[in-house]
């Protein structure tokens, strides 16, 4: 039920200049489907609805240890072969793996079942820690709330940062979490004054992206040693200060490329990369295209 709720919320028809998605739930046996919370869900559409979908997301199901019906696997394969983006949330990855769509690719799923996925499908490189893995025509996401991260990533990829951020704000969610971020924190971090200082430093860093922001400076502002700061940062965010800043800078660069006419050199300085060459190298590594190509692709989101 959570998976169905996540995708229906993200791809809701909001208007206000945002894309108007044609969203539908499908199953091989339309009708009343009993959910994991005991409430029945009426699914009107059969697998024929997948024939025209640009994006197909396989959701978790209770009996995921048993491969889906052959008709489901055939429909997923057909969607992928005709060029649709096929994704999976949580243990929905088992359906994609059973269809052979993950063979030779990296993938993730809920950390609790990552070992089982790797055991059952040795041709798949399973990353048990990633929030989501994007392999181009196929994408997989971790469990539970990580479904939001996967969906927002796909929106960012296809429609740009402005659209993804607008929908994230509407859902009161973080606008972007990198796919390589840890799925969970092994040890809960107690709420104390260090956490408050860390939150204040992160908020300050967001407002000062144009500055170098070395870890030593962030640690000083948090009143911690560099080692203690790095440890506390990883425990609280699941990533490193460097990776967090890099993701933040690239996300801000995406927004500026979409919503302003600022020269790339000026955008690079505004987000802390220093030069257009550095921004271009990082942008190509993350987005697969240089900044100017990204701007041309998503210019429709401006204004």
Image (cartoon, rainbow, N blue to C red):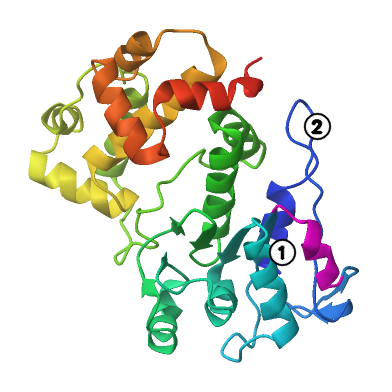
The answer for how far apart the CA atoms under marks 2 and 1 are is 21 Å
Residue 4: which numbered mark, if any?
1
Image quarter hosting the N terminus: bottom right
Q: Residue furthest front?
A: 82
Residue 15: which numbered mark, if any?
2
The part of the image, by quadrant, that contains residue 61 is: bottom right
The part of the image, by quadrant, that contains residue 107 is: bottom left
Q: What span is in magenta? A: 46-54
Chain-order first, disc 2 or disc 1? 1
- Residue at 61% across / 88% down in the picture? 67
Q: Nearer the viewer, residue 83 or 90?
A: 83
Give the percent coordinates (x, y) of residue 55: 68, 55
User: Measured along the vertical axis of the image, is residue 233 above or below residue 17?
Assistant: below
The part of the image, by quadrant, that contains residue 29 is: bottom right
User: Measured along the vertical axis of the image, is residue 170 above or below residue 290?
Assistant: below
Q: Nearer the viewer, residue 72 or 169?
A: 72
């Amino acid at each position: 039920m959570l998976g169905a709720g996540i995708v229906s919320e993200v791809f809701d028809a909001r208007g206000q200049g945002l894309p108007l998605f044609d969203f539908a739930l499908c199953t091989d046996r339309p009708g009343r489907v009993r959910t994991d919370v005991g409430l029945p869900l009426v699914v009107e559409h059969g697998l024929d609805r997948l024939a025209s979908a640009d994006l197909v997301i396989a959701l978790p199901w209770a009996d995921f240890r048993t491969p889906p019906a052959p008709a489901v696997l055939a429909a997923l394969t057909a969607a992928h072969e005709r060029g649709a983006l096929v994704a999976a949330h949580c243990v929905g990855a088992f359906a994609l793996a059973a269809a052979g769509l993950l063979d030779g690719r990296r993938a993730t799923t809920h950390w609790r079942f990552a070992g089982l996925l790797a055991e059952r499908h040795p041709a798949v490189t399973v990353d048990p820690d990633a929030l989501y893995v994007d392999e181009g025509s196929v994408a997989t996401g971790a469990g539970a709330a990580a479904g939001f991260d996967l969906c927002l990533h796909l929106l960012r990829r296809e429609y740009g940062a402005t659209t993804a951020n607008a929908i994230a704000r509407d859902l009161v969610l973080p606008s972007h979490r990198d796919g390589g971020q840890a799925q969970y924190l092994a040890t809960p971090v107690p709420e104390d004054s260090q956490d408050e200082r860390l939150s204040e430093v992160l908020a300050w860093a967001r407002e000062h992206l144009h500055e170098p922001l070395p870890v030593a400076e962030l640690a000083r502002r948090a009143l911690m040693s560099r080692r203690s700061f790095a440890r506390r940062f990883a425990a609280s965010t699941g990533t490193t200060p460097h990776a967090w800043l890099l993701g933040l800078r690239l996300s801000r660069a995406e927004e500026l490329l979409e919503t302003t006419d600022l020269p790339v050199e000026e955008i690079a300085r505004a987000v802390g990369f220093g030069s257009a060459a550095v921004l271009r190298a990082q942008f190509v590594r993350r987005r697969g295209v240089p900044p100017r190509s990204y701007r041309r692709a998503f210019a429709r989101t401006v204004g």
